[in-house]
Image (cartoon, helix red, strand yellow):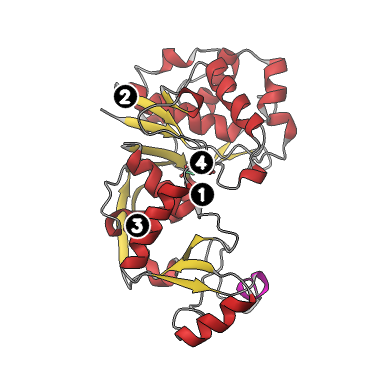
Amino acid sequence: MTVGRYAPSPSGRMHLGNLLCCLLAWLSAKHQGGRVVLRVEDLDAARCPRRYADLLQADLAWLGIPADEGGDKGGPAAPYFQSERSDIYQQYFDLLCKKGLVYPCFCSRGQLHAPSAPHLADGQVLYPGTCRDLTPGEVAARSARRPPAWRVRVPEEVVSFTDGHLGPYAQDLARECGDFLLRRADGVFAYQLAVVVDDALMGVTEVVRGADLLSSTPRQLWLYRTLDLPAPGFVHLPLLLDADGRRLSKRDGDQSLEHLQQRYTPEQIVGKLAFVCGLQSAPDPRPAADLVDAFSWEKVPKTDLCLPEGLF
Ligand code: GLU
């Protein structure tokens, strides 16, 4: 059975981009007769107060796309809040350590983001491997001054996969990703490790998420393989832009659910989003459940989606 998932980081109210992602994840799973798990990605607990997770669950129910498992509902893979799963991440972190793949990194933020640091196409900084080969003596001396972050050593390997919507994608791990963080210096595990462990242990078979995470997928697939965990299929959806071509963010307050709920019914919001992503030809009100049968990824464009002026 298809198991989809919502994996929001509730640091504020959902905006239209989050809603579109949830709607498509739900429709894709339901169209295949599957179910959806809600995992709250609140690794950075200080940035994700519980009240936003509560609101998010109420919002999903209001929109007619509640999760079948997870969140406060619980289920066989509980807990579903990443802030409560550190012990589990620790086990997989230890496994990578045993394989000799993990090393401490003492680089400061300033060093990592220096203008001379190699930058990737998406603006991210490629870690140049500064701490990759420190001697035990160097590690001991630096540890006495500051606690390290922890990185995983990626191999010289091109990882490729076929995205369920965007097609073939390949990445040279050493050159386009670099040794990435598994754990921050303050002890918080990194998204890349947590997401892989969680999707595997929660039995997720289909990951639907924004195209901004496409370039994270090869390193995640490599982690699945290295940790001997079953990998899901990946479907990345185009990003939702405002009428000026800017990415929507939680800062655009008027497009947050808090404001949308005052102006529109759930059916109106779902209908407008379905129109924007090609699932219906006009922005007519529509309950999410009515879109399940005719859902197809083929109707959804592959390039960024622009919200027409005045639609919301
Ligand atoms: N928590 C991430 C976000 O809200 C999504 C992670 C994922 O879908 O893999 O952007």
Chain-order first, disc 2 or disc 3: 2
Residue type highlighted by circle 2:
Gly
Check residue 63 for magenta coloring: no
Q: Residues within 10 Å of mark 1 (few under 14, many from 20)?
A: few
Q: Which residue is mark 1?
A: 212
Let me know if residue 164 appears in the view.
no
- Nearer mark to the viewer, of 2 and 4: 4
Residue type highlighted by circle 3:
Leu
**Can you give x and y, in whole percent of width and height, for residue 56 in the image?**
59, 27
Q: Residues within 10 Å of mark 2 (few under 14, many from 20)?
A: some
Judged left or right of residue 202, residue 240 is: right
- Vertical side of 190 occupied by 77: above or below: above
**Can you give x and y, in whole percent of width and height, for residue 223 in the image?**
34, 57
- The response on whether ligand 1 sits within 8 Å of label 1 is yes
For mark 2, give the secondary structure. loop
Q: Which residue is mark 3?
A: 223
Q: Which residue is mark 4?
A: 84
Quadrant location of the C terminus in the rendered image: top right
Chain-order first, disc 2 or disc 4: 2
For mark 4, give the secondary structure. helix
Residue type highlighted by circle 1:
Asp
Residue type highlighted by circle 4:
Glu
- Vertical side of 186 occupied by 263: above or below: above
Q: Who's the residue at 60% across and 60% down the image? A: 186
**Can you give x and y, in whole percent of width and height, for residue 280 in the image?**
47, 20
Name the one closer to the observer, 167 or 5. Answer: 5
| Residue contact between numbered discs 2 and 1, judged by CB atoms under 8 Å | no
